[in-house]
Image (cartoon, helix red, strand yellow):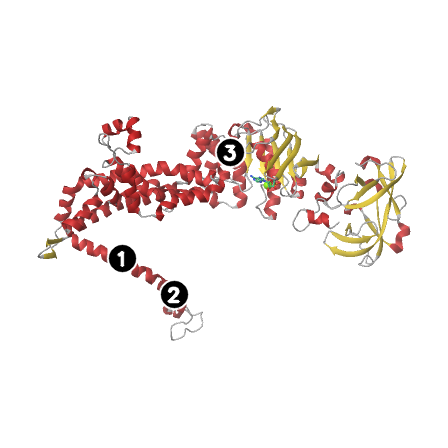
């Protein structure tokens, strides 16, 4: 600033010292500091630590040393790719189910609920009042062998079909992929509904009338007006569902079997039971990178970078 | 452009439309006939049911009873997406995710018109509303007036039989509003279809409409051309809502030829029988009205110069305000506490100052008579814009 002033002869002679009155200039940056510090301690440091752990070798007794042993990554992928695939598959199915279940509900709340709106909203959020773990355990009872749900599905011959598809086993639902996907869907449904509702609620109801006025039938109005305008909610809802679901291990642990293990379960076992820290760290890192790539491609494709 | 002219202008009829929202009666037996190719304005204070009536014509609202006819056909049960009515919404309601040209083309897309033809016709309509070069812009990149034009073009694309406009100019500033009034009138002449235009602005209705339907409390109070409504109001509501009227309570005295002699205060007033919408039995009460610009003002000292045969009232000037082309006087008189008089500024008389004793006089032909059993203040425009119950309580 000082040089710029001295180069402009038309101005009054520049004071020798720095111009005053600029004290407030740094205030916004100071305000950022706590946040930056937080990110550093709880995001950047663990990342560095995780990367360094993933390239260590050694054993629990002799201690681990950084040896830049990148082979851990290839070994982890080679050993556990089925679990990776399963994570993507289960999380993807749960996300699609959440969208199919959540969209009509969000639509109903936004446009049709009238004075029931707040009540339904509370009902959507109410499950959060009890622990994630308890709720998932409850599903164990709901889907238990010989329980009412299994009984009904069995008598309707639904289980015959699903078993042929390989997502249930015989007359069991518990300990099958279906149970895990159901648990994921149930647990992450509110994360889908809330952003969907927010973006639907912002849509002016007159737009529906305007479309109707221009010969759009109700379903066409939905396809050409409502749905495009709710895309920001769809994108953020699917991300908020898919990302945590693909790293989840509780549902697979409580509702699944050894055949339904997801990456989250492998990481958990490696870290807490086998104590193979490098493999666990490498797996975490691969999962993170994979999600990042998928999310980036997805956002690109849905063309809503500025809306998420 | 010529393919969109004329041919499809339709009649519109409302038959005894009634609609209640809980305790509110929005429409209370609305009857209205609109001739083909006419620009009719539904004029009335806010809350009188204008929007509800329009939405029934568009098919967004269903009447509790009564019917809507377009071109003689009962469309009451026809859903909005099968009616030939184009609607311009009060807040425009353009699709925010579509460009101007795609907004305009939306109606054609719904009718499965091919892309090339669609865009050509949309461009043609954007030209009609003077936005030929703004087609690729999105609604948020357009000014209020431009969005308004896009909304009009969008509503016209399917050749509707009737175009519905709900306070289309309400959100624009005064200057733009004047400009758009002329613009809409031009578009209407060009496309030649029936326009139903809702407004609470009497000046807008008078400027644009061929026929004005003055609405009050969910029904049509009076229907007519702007000048007919202005000159021959049949209720105090119309007399006050359209412009300003001075209303005097009077008693029928005698008849003389085709006129009626009335007693008001100490003096006598003459009223042409043809201009009285109330029964005139001797001794009965009548409200006598006269518009402020029809009145002349003479200082009491010069009262002798006033030609014979004019209606006269004496009073005292309470206030004057000079507004350039004219001067507005408020005169206190025995028959009417706040008589308003507008005098053109041709030869200003310096003696006409507050406190001066004056004689108000006018040609009896400019007098109109109304039924006496209504509030003198119905339809007066206060600062809030509408006469309210409070006004009436103050009588
Ligand atoms: N959907 C609705 N629900 C409840 N009341 C309504 C509704 N629409 C209109 N009204 C009421 O009906 C009356 C007429 O409304 P409206 O037709 O919008 O009047 P205007 O357009 O002349 O201002 C008002 O008192 C309004 O509050
Ligand atoms: Mg309205």
- Residue at the spot of label 1: A42
- Measured as percent of width and height from the top left, residue B70 is found at 60, 27
Question: In front: A302, or A206?
Answer: A206
Q: Nearer the viewer, mark 1 or mark 2?
A: 1
Q: Are marks 1 and 3 on the same chain?
A: no
Chain containing mark 3: B
In the image, taking residue B287 as reference, residue B39 lies left or right, namely left
Using the image, name the chain to which the residue with label 2 belongs: A
Marks 2 and 3: in contact by CB < 8 Å?
Answer: no
Q: Secondary structure at mark 3?
A: helix
Per the rendering, the mark at residue B124 is: 3
- Mark 3 vs mark 2, CA separation in Å: 55 Å
**Residue A269 location, x and y as percent?**
17, 47
The residue located at (43%, 74%) in the rendering is: A13
Q: Is mark 3 within 8 Å of ligand 2?
A: no
Q: Give x and y (percent) for residue A47.
A: 23, 55
- Residue at (26% x, 42% y) in the render: A251
- Image quadrant for the N terminus of chain B? top right
Q: CA distance from mark 1 to mark 2?
A: 24 Å
Q: Residue furthest top?
A: B73
Task: Confirm whether circles 1 and 2 share one chain.
Answer: yes
User: Ligand 2 is in which quadrant of the figure?
Assistant: top right
Q: Chain ID for label 1? A: A
Mark 1, secondary structure of its residue: helix
**Residue tagged 2:** A27
For mark 2, does the 10 Å Cα neighbourhood hold few (<14), some (14 to 19), or many (20 or more) residues? few
Dot 2 lies on which element? helix
**Nearer to me, B360 or A117:** A117
Work out whether residue B132 can be spotted.
no
Residue A139 position, x and y percent, is 29, 40
């Amino acid at each position: 600033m000082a040089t710029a002033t001295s180069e402009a002869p038309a101005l009054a002679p520049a004071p020798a010292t720095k111009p005053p009155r600029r004290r407030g200039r740094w205030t916004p940056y100071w305000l950022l500091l706590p946040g930056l510090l937080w990110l550093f301690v709880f995001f950047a440091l663990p990342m560095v630590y995780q990367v360094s752990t993933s390239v260590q070798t050694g054993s629990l007794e002799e201690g681990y040393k950084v040896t830049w042993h990148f082979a851990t990554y290839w070994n982890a992928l080679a050993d556990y790719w089925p679990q990776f695939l399963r994570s993507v598959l289960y999380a993807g199915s749960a996300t699609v189910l959440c969208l199919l279940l959540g969209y009509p509900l969000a639509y109903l709340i936004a446009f049709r609920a009238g004075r029931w709106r707040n009540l339904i909203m509370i009902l959507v959020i109410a499950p959060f009042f009890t622990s994630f773990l308890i709720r998932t355990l409850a599903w164990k009872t709901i889907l238990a062998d010989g329980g009412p749900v299994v009984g009904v599905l069995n008598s309707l011959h639904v289980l015959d079909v699903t078993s042929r598809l390989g997502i249930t086993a015989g007359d069991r639902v518990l300990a099958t992929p279906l149970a895990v996907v159901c648990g994921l869907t149930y647990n992450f449904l509110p994360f889908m509904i809330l952003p969907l509702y927010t973006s639907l609620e912002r849509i002016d109801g007159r737009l529906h009338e305007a479309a109707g006025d221009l010969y759009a039938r109700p379903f066409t109005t939905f396809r050409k007006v409502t749905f495009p305008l709710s895309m920001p909610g769809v994108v953020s809802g699917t991300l908020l569902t898919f990302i945590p679901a693909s790293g989840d291990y509780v549902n697979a642990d409580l509702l699944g079997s050894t055949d339904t293990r997801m990456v989250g379960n492998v990481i958990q076992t490696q870290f807490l039971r086998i104590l193979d820290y490098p493999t666990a760290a490498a797996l975490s890192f691969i999962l993170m990178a994979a999600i990042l790539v998928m999310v980036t491609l997805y956002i690109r494709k849905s063309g809503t970078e500025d809306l998420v | 452009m010529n393919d969109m002219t004329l041919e499809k202008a339709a009649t519109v009829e409302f038959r005894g439309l009634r609609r209640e929202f809980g305790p509110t009666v929005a429409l209370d037996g609305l009857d209205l006939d609109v001739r083909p190719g006419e620009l009719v304005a539904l004029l009335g204070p806010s809350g009188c049911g204008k929007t509800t009536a329009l939405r029934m014509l568009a098919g967004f609202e269903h009447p509790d009873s009564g019917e809507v006819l377009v071109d003689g056909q009962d469309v009451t049960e026809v859903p909005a997406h099968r009616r030939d009515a184009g609607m311009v919404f009060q807040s425009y309601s353009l699709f925010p995710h579509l460009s101007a040209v795609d907004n305009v083309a939306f109606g054609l897309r719904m009718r499965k018109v091919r892309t090339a033809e669609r865009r050509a016709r949309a461009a043609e309509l954007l030209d009609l509303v003077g936005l030929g070069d703004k087609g690729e812009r999105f609604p948020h990149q357009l000014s209020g007036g431009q969005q308004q034009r896009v909304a009009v073009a969008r509503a016209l694309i399917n050749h509707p039989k009737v175009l519905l406009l709900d306070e289309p100019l309400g959100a624009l500033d005064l200057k733009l509003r004047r400009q758009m009034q002329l613009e809409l009138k031009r578009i209407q002449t060009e496309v030649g279809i029936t326009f139903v235009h809702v407004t609470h602005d009497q000046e807008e209705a008078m400027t644009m409409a061929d026929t004005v339907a003055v609405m009050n409390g969910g029904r049509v109070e009076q229907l007519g051309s702007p000048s007919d409504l202005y000159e021959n109001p049949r209720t105090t509501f119309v007399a006050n809502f359209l412009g300003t009227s001075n209303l005097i309570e009077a008693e029928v005295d005698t008849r003389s030829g085709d006129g009626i002699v009335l007693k008001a205060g100490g003096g006598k007033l003459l009223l042409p029988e043809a201009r009285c919408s109330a029964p005139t039995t001797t001794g009965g009460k009548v409200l006598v009205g006269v518009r402020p610009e029809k009145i002349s003002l003479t200082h009491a000292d010069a009262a002798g110069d006033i030609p014979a045969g004019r209606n006269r009232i004496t009073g005292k000037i309470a206030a004057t305000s000079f507004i350039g082309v004219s001067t507005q006087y408020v005169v206190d008189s025995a028959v009417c506490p706040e008589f308003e008089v507008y005098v053109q500024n041709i030869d200003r008389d310096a003696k006409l100052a507050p406190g001066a004793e004056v004689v108000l006089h006018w040609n009896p032909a400019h007098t109109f008579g109304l039924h006496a059993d209504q509030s003198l203040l119905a339809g007066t425009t206060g600062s809030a814009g509408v006469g309210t119950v409070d006004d009436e309580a103050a009588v």
